[in-house]
Amino acid sequence: MSLENFNLSLFVENLVEDFRPSASGKNIQLHCETPGNHVYLVSDKHLVARICENLVSNALKYTPPGKNVWISVSDEQDAVNIKVKDEGVGIEPSKCPIFSAATAISPPCLPAAKPLPAWGSPL
């Protein structure tokens, strides 16, 4: 795991541009919402990229033509949020054991008893 401080707003804007041809090919409108001020995150940029790419890829895969996919970044007091929303069929809640809003992902190299710093661990 390699932590670095990076501009999350710019990161998400670039991610959206990378997926725009795929969205356009399916006649899906891809929307990007980032705050006016830049939001910075200290995290493993490659891990964040893998997670975001997976979410956006799935959103495009399961959204019918003519619909929309939104990717947004928001800055809270002590956290940042990346949200991917689509107009696809969705997943039945009982079949969706996804992380809760407070779930922190710790890498295997850190002991479970040692919490990660709040600046970038949850996603």
Image (cartoon, rainbow, N blue to C red):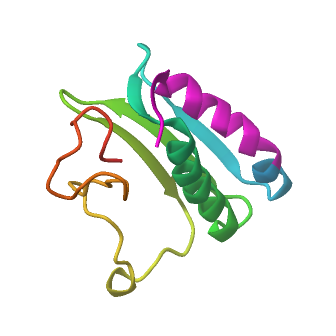
Query: For this view, does 84 lie left or right of residue 67?
Result: left
Percent coordinates x, y for residue 2 in the rendering: 48, 36
Quarter of the image where one finds residue 93: bottom left
Query: For this view, does 53 lie left or right of residue 77?
Result: right
Residue span colored magenta: 1-21
Task: Report the predominant secondary structure element of the magenta stretch.
Answer: helix
Percent coordinates x, y for residue 23 in the rendering: 75, 51
Q: Which residue shows up at 29% across the image and 51% down it?
A: 110
Query: For this view, does 31 lie left or right of residue 8?
Result: right
Quarter of the image where one finds residue 62: bottom right
Residue found at the very far top of the displayed protein: 37
Query: For this view, does 59 lie left or right of residue 1?
Result: right
Percent coordinates x, y for residue 45 in the rendering: 52, 36
Which is nearer the eye, 109 or 56? 109
Percent coordinates x, y for residue 21 in the rendering: 82, 45
Q: Which residue shows up at 36% across the image and 47% down it?
A: 123
Q: Is residue 123 magenta?
A: no
Residue found at the very far bottom of the displayed protein: 94
Q: Is residue 7 magenta?
A: yes
Quarter of the image where one finds residue 116: top left
Which is nearer the eye, 3 or 13? 3
Which is nearer the eye, 79 or 43? 43
Q: Which residue shows up at 38% across the image and 28% down it?
A: 42
